[in-house]
């Protein structure tokens, strides 16, 4: 058995190295064709970051806010709840720490995220952008404060959700995604942590730090990014992909909502490294106690072939989804107007109640200065 295990790992390692090599070669070729200072498909990047900031002004901007609490932490920085001193309005300040070794890369990420947030300002299911500014060590977004916590936290609290609840959350996410896709944006990191709930229980898609813009027409991209458990097979296989990856992630979220469990189980040895989890065999546990209608949608989203996947047809994808029997009861016009009553209203005792956020962040000191970490 042990012998087999080792052989298996060796094989996987070989496969992984080959895939990584293919990906690097592809990236090198693409960069050569596009010119070195090009990212995305049509987003030219300046050679140098030549923005001059006056530190007094930056301090002044930070002093406009009173920091209340830390409410989240991501790979690139933290998120703080803050109150504008002038308007008393609450905001979530998302802080992105600049990487001094890769300033251009951090700037590109900030710029793309900002562009997406600005584009999506009027969509009811995407987090609202208020403003952004930078300090010598960080970029900061002031976003609408969405106070009901995220879908992951709600799922942990409730266990599996009823099919009606699943239908509601999926429908609102589909409307948000459909908007992003129509603007040439693929989210690429859709997961329950990035679906926030507002005070009434409506969703807001957030975190566009890994999103891709410029995916118009049949354009494809190849970067391997996101969260391992939600990655679509075409992304892992370095085959080139478009919006299809978001629908696969939506299928995984649907699975998790219906079962209360993770979608994939890994062999023991596969849990060890990220590479093994990515490129090893993934196994799902079958579900038995769901309706035929829900099962058809789940199978549709989890189709391995993106051409056959539900929602992925460039012209008729949205129509295909809304005409599935599972969504028969949804009035899409009412839903888009946020007039469908959500199945769950997050408990809130006041406007600065942060009990819907993880207590480990809440315990941190809410300090934000132009130089603080
Ligand atoms: P990641 O490493 O997961 O990509 P990130 O650094 O990009 O994280 P976000 O995912 O945007 O940061 O935010 C981290 C967490 O902060 C979220 O899961 C959420 O709990 C909280 N959060 C983010 N934006 C808001 C907001 N507008 N209102 C309330 N909470 C928010």
Image (spheres, rainbow, N blue to C red):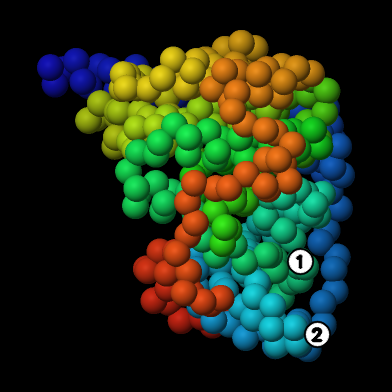
Seen in the picture, residue 252 relative to 135 is either above or below; the reply is above
Residue on which disc 2 sits = 57
Q: Can residue 13 be seen?
A: yes
Q: Which mark is residue 329?
A: none
Label 2, secondary structure: give it. helix
Ligand 1: does it lie within 8 Å of the C-beta at label 2?
no
Marks 2/1: CA distance?
A: 18 Å
Q: x%, y% of residue 47?
A: 85, 53
Q: Which residue is mark 1?
A: 130
- Residue 110 makes an appearance in the image: no
Q: Which quadrant of the figure has residue 211? A: top right
Which residue is at a point 82% across and 28% down the rendered structure image? Answer: 216
Total marks shown come to 2
Q: Position of residue 74 (x, y in %)?
A: 51, 58
Q: Is residue 48 above or below residue 169?
A: below
Q: Is residue 291 above or below residue 78?
A: above
Residue in front for this viewpoint, 154 or 331: 331
Q: Residue at x 47, y 59 (%)?
A: 346
Q: Residue at x 37, y 69 (%)?
A: 359
Disc 2 residue crowd, few under 14, some 14–19, many 20+, Cα 10 Å: few
Residue 356's x, y, as percent?
44, 64
Residue 226 in the figure: left or right of residue 42:
left
The single residue placed furthest to the left in the displayed view is: 1
Residue density around tag 1, few if under 14, some if 14–19, many if 20 or more, within 10 Å: some
Question: Residue 32: percent from the left, percent from the top?
Answer: 80, 30
- Is tag 2's residue or tag 1's residue first in the polypeptide sequence? 2
| Quadrant the N terminus occupies | top left
Q: Nearer the viewer, residue 62 or 27?
A: 62
Q: Viewer-proximal residue, 312 or 111?
A: 312
Q: Secondary structure at mark 1?
A: strand
Q: From the image, which quarter does the C terminus lie in?
A: bottom right
Residue at 85%, 68% in the rendered image? 51
């Amino acid at each position: 058995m042990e012998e087999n295990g080792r052989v298996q790992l060796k094989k996987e390692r070989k496969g992984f190295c080959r895939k990584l090599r293919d990906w690097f070669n592809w990236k090198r070729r693409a960069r050569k064709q596009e010119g070195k200072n090009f990212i995305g498909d049509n987003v030219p990047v300046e050679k140098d970051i030549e923005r001059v900031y006056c530190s007094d002004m930056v301090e002044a901007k930070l002093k406009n806010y009173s920091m209340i609490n830390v409410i989240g932490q991501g790979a690139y920085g933290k998120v703080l709840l803050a109150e504008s001193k002038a308007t008393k309005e609450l905001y979530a300040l998302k802080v992105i720490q600049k990487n001094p070794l890769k300033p251009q890369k951090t700037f590109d990420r900030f710029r793309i995220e900002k562009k997406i947030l600005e584009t999506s300002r009027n969509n009811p299911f995407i987090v609202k952008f208020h403003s952004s500014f930078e300090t010598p060590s960080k970029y900061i977004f002031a976003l609408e404060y969405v106070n009901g916590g995220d879908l992951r936290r709600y799922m942990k609290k409730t266990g599996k959700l009823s099919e009606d609840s699943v239908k509601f959350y999926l429908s609102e996410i589909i409307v948000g995604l459909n908007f992003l896709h129509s603007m040439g944006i693929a989210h690429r990191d859709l997961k329950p942590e990035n679906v926030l709930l507002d005070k009434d229980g409506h969703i807001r898609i957030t975190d566009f730090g890994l999103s891709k813009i410029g995916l118009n027409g049949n354009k494809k991209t190849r970067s391997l990014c996101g969260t391992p458990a939600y990655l679509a097979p075409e992304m892992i296989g370095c085959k080139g992909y478009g919006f299809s990856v978001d629908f696969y992630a939506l299928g995984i979220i649907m699975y998790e909502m219906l079962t209360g469990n993770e979608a994939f189980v890994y062999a023991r040895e596969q849990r060890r490294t990220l590479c093994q989890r990515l490129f090893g065999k993934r196994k799902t546990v079958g579900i038995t106690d769901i309706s035929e209608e829900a099962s058809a949608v789940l199978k549709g989203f989890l189709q391995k072939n993106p051409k056959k996947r539900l929602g992925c047809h460039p012209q008729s994808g949205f129509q295909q989804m809304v005409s599935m029997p599972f969504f028969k009861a949804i009035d899409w016009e009412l839903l888009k107007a946020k007039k469908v009553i959500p199945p769950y209203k997050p408990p809130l005792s006041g406007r600065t109640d942060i009990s819907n956020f993880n207590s480990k962040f809440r315990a941190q000191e809410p300090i934000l200065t132009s130089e603080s970490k």
